[in-house]
């Protein structure tokens, strides 16, 4: 499913679109490094998702990294290398969503030359060994004499677990996320069995010199540490095949590399490399090289003389040109040069006849040579975010092309003979200057995904109906006046987005698109909710926001599959009761309308999870919402609507409520029983008139986000530190005295809690001192009056009066008893002090008041 239809959690966070990240996994391990490619896997295979799910291999297994379409042309003697696979996700702005795929049907072949070693790793940890273990303790474990993996990830180890090496068959050792800095105590004979060693995230500043003892090591991963240089000891590992050093601080690479002749994969992404040694070609077996996000300013010529290189990643550097020697990369199949400074492409790059994937997004290219026709094996071409005004007609010779991404350029048209790209499945031309879509697009019989958002297109050719395999189309923010009826004939179309156009009417033809699952139609000119839409019985996601709709047809009850319905920014004055027939509805957005009340029938929405009623015209909080037992998120912020002044006690009935937004109202107090909302995780109550937090508020143990900015709070409850789940707090723009605003500006609960705890201790000492001042200075008559004003029980006073203790002792005991009784009803120490002072003033005990005032002046000058 798409990210907007598969999960209401993803769909309704402000009902916005998500931008995508770029990443490529380190072969064999679970860490990711940034990658600048875009996804291009089939929409049906993704279940209509907008992004490819990232693979996160276990630490006790080795993940393969895929290079597109490689055949078994390598010698059998090299089979011990490892198969490689890369997981690629997109990097696009929220509307482009350009994609590139590693899983296109024609490039499903992996590097079979690396298969044997992968088979050695069955991805199962045969035994998990504790940090301190002896051979005696391992007698009962099932050991495999050929494949024994030890997984000690995140065990808090500070030393190399040398004890486990006493076991004969330890080959694959995973020590990620520990604190190991050296291998002291490990015997060289014990280390000989280790073939795979992973030490990611250990905080290593350098590689222990003992690494030279691992003579049979084939794979080493020391990524995500703090290593600044590569030690010479590493160069003694003659059997190493795969070396991963991503995310470190390495500035240079050693020059004497001859001893690493067996190396096949080298990954140095996200370091600080400025140059590559000229001796690099001595790595004659190197086939995969990752140098992404370093500080290279030129394309190192040394890279051009790696005879077996098939994949080169130079994304995120500062390269402005390519050397003529690029033509020597005869076997290169994958070249990533996204996010560099390229202004032109040397013609030599077009002599790389085996290239299958070429990524040049986010550069400064203004022209592509007609020699692109040489790329007869090209599957993926990424040219997003450049300065291109035209794509050469000769691109039609790239007959194997499956993904073509041209977003964020200055194109006014596509090549006239684009129809010759018979294998093209993904075409992205978002944010260009396109005036029309050529009729020849109808000949792209394998096309699955089309994106032409943010252009100047006025109509869609009827011939698009011949693109029988298309599953996803985005035409947002163009100048389309009429609904493209040709789309209604596309029987495989599941995802259609036409936001931000000028369409005023839905044609009857849309009734035939019963396979549609996702339809976006916001920011158009619709005056009615068309009954033709109600024929889409499989539709799950419907966005009709920012139109001029006033009514809902009765036939909406036919839309039995609808999960998400967005009707924000329309013209509804009365809540459409017809919506209450949608029993499967999970998300409903009616924000920014003119609603004044909610009908009781809303309780029929048994599965509703998220409601957005913000910016409407409610006379009061609609208590009908409190019947919705399934509700998890409620937004009733009124930034543009009529302000609410109170919340009902019935709010506590919504026991599943996790997120509540009541911001931008005029609410004066939070209900006393708010603590019954035990599932509440987020409370947004900023810009109100709330002046205190009720005691039950401190029962919200799951609360993580609390925003009370712009209210009338003068004090925070001392026990607020008990809300241990709180991660985000905001008390800005409140007249806070306790703690003062300076303490709260840091938005750190710990700081606030420390202040309040110390303030409580201070208040207790002050109150204790005041009790003694009163006890030593009050008269018998004034004591009786004081007891009356403080509503002390006569029984306690009478018992103390009949005793033989002195007046001062009796007064002190009564005041202590009064404090304990008042604390039982949750009065704070500061409140008790104020109440006592008021009572003394009322009985005319001015001498005592003078002493208390003097004491207050004294306490302001010192700290207890």
Image (cartoon, helix red, strand yellow):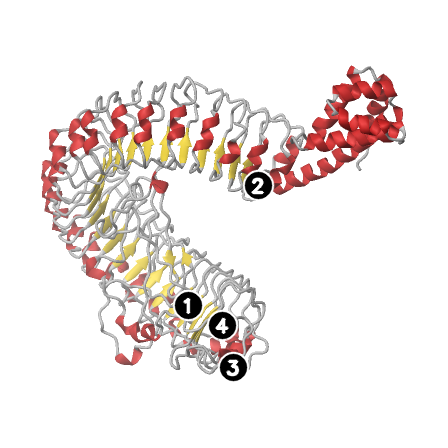
Helix, strand or loop under label 2: loop
Where is mark 4, residue-wise? 129
Q: From the viewer's perspective, tell me whether residue 756 is left or right of residue 698.
A: right
Determine the residue positioned at 63% across, 26% down. 714
* Mark 3 surroundings within 10 Å by alpha-carbon count, few (fewer than 14), some (14 through 19), many (20 or more): some
Nearer the observer, 684 or 778: 778
Where is mark 3, residue-wise? 166
Q: Position of residue 295 (x, y in %)?
A: 45, 56
Where is mark 2, residue-wise? 723
* Mark 2 surroundings within 10 Å by alpha-carbon count, few (fewer than 14), some (14 through 19), many (20 or more): some
Looking at the rendered image, the quarter that the C terminus falls into is top right
| Nearer mark to the viewer, of 1 and 4 | 4
Helix, strand or loop under label 4: loop
Q: Marks 1/4: CA distance?
A: 12 Å
Among the 4 quarters of the image, the one containing residue 802 = top right
Among the 4 quarters of the image, the one containing residue 11 = top left
Nearer the observer, 730 or 441: 730
How many marks on residues? 4
Q: Marks 4/3: CA distance?
A: 12 Å
Helix, strand or loop under label 3: helix
Q: Marks 2/4: CA distance?
A: 38 Å
Q: From the viewer's perspective, tell me whether residue 717 is left or right of residue 655.
A: right
Where is mark 1, residue-wise? 60
Q: From the viewer's perspective, tell me whether residue 514 is left or right of residue 47.
A: left
Q: Marks 2/1: CA distance?
A: 38 Å
Q: Position of residue 606 (x, y in %)?
A: 32, 35
Task: Name the mark on residue 421.
Answer: none
Q: Position of residue 44 (x, y in %)?
A: 21, 50
């Amino acid at each position: 499913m798409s990210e907007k239809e598969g999960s209401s959690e993803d769909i309704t966070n402000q009902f916005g679109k998500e931008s995508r990240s770029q990443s490529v996994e380190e072969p064999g391990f679970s860490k990711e490094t940034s990658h600048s490619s875009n996804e291009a896997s089939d929409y049906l295979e993704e279940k209509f998702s907008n992004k490819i799910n990232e693979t996160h291999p276990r630490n006790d297994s080795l993940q393969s990294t895929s290079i597109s379409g490689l055949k078994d042309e390598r010698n059998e003697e090299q089979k011990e290398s490892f198969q490689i696979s890369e997981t690629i996700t997109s990097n696009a702005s929220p509307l482009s969503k350009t994609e590139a795929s590693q899983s296109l049907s024609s490039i499903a072949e992996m590097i079979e030359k690396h298969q044997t070693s992968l088979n050695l790793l069955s991805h199962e940890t045969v035994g998990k060994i504790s940090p301190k273990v002896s051979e005696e303790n391992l007698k009962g474990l099932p050991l495999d004499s050929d494949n024994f993996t030890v997984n000690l990830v995140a065990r808090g180890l500070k030393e190399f677990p040398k004890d486990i090496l006493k076991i004969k068959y330890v080959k694959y050792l995973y020590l990620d996320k520990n604190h190991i800095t050296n291998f002291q105590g490990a015997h060289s004979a014990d280390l000989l069995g280790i073939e795979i060693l992973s030490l990611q995230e250990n905080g290593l500043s350098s590689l222990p010199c003992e690494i030279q003892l691992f003579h049979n090591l084939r794979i080493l991963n020391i990524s995500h540490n703090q290593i600044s240089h590569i030690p010479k000891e590493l160069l003694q590992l003659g059997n190493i095949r795969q070396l991963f050093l991503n995310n470190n601080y390495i500035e240079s690479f050693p020059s004497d590399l001859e001893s690493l002749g067996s190396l096949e994969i080298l990954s140095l992404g996200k370091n600080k490399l400025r140059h590559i040694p000229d001796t690099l070609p001595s790595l004659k077996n190197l086939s995969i090289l990752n140098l992404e996000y370093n500080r290279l300013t030129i394309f190192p010529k040394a890279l051009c003389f790696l005879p077996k290189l098939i994949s080169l990643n130079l994304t995120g550097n500062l390269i402005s040109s390519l050397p003529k020697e690029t033509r020597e990369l005869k076997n290169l199949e994958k070249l990533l040069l996204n996010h560099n400074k390229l202004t032109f492409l040397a013609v030599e790059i077009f002599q790389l006849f085996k290239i299958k994937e070429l990524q040049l997004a986010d550069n400064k290219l203004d022209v592509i040579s007609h020699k692109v026709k040489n790329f007869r094996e090209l599957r993926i071409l990424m040219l997003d975010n450049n300065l291109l005004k035209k794509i050469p007609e000769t691109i039609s010779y790239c007959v194997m092309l499956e993904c073509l991404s041209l977003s964020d350029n200055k194109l006014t048209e596509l090549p006239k003979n684009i129809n010759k790209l018979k294998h093209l499945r993904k075409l992205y031309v978002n944010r260009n200057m396109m005036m029309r879509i050529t009729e020849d697009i109808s000949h792209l019989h394998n096309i699955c995904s089309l994106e032409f958002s943010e252009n100047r297109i006025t109509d869609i050719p009827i011939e698009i109906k011949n693109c029988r395999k298309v599953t996803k189309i985005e035409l947002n923010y163009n100048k389309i006046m009429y609904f493209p009826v040709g789309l209604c004939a596309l029987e495989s179309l599941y995802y259609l987005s036409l936001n931000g156009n000028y369409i005023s009417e839905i044609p009857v033809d849309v009734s035939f698109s019963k396979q549609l699952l996702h339809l976006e139609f916001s920011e158009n000119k619709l005056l009615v909710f068309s009954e033709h839409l109600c024929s889409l019985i499989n539709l799950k996601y419907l966005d009709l926001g920012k139109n001029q709709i006033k009514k809902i047809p009765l036939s909406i009850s036919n839309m039995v599959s609808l999960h998400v319905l967005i009707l924000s920014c329309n013209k509804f004055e009365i809540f459409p009761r017809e919506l209450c027939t949608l029993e499967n509805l999970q998300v409903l957005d009616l924000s920014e309308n003119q609603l004044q009340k909610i009908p009781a029938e809303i309780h029929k929405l048994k599965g509703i999870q998220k409601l957005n009623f913000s910016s409407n015209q409610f006379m009061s909080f609609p208590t009908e919402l409190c019947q919705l037992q399934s509700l998890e998120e409620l937004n009733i912020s009124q930034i543009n609507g009529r302000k609410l002044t109170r919340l009902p006690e019935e709010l506590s009935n919504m026991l599943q409520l996790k997120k509540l937004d009541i911001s931008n109202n005029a609410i004066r107090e939070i209900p006393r029983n708010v603590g019954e909302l035990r599932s509440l995780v987020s409370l947004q109550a900023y810009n109100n008139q709330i002046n205190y937090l009720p005691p039950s508020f401190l029962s919200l143990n799951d609360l993580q986000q609390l925003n009370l900015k712009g209210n009338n709070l003068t004090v925070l409850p001392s026990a607020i530190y008990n809300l241990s789940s709180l991660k985000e707090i905001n008390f800005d723009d409140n007249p806070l005295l306790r703690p003062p605003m300076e303490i709260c500006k840091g938005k750190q609960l710990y700081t606030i809690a420390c202040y309040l705890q110390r303030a409580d201790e201070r208040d207790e000492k002050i109150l204790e001192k005041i009790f003694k001042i009163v006890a030593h200075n009050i008269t018998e008559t004034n004591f009786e009056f004081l007891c009356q004003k403080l509503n002390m029980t006569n029984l306690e006073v009478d018992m103390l009066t009949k005793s033989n203790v002195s007046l001062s002792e009796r007064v002190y005991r009564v005041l202590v008893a009064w404090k304990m009784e008042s604390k039982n009803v949750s009065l704070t120490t500061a409140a008790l002090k104020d109440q006592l002072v008021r009572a003394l003033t009322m009985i005319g005990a001015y001498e005592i008041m003078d002493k208390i005032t003097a004491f207050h002046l004294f306490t302001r000058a010192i700290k207890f």
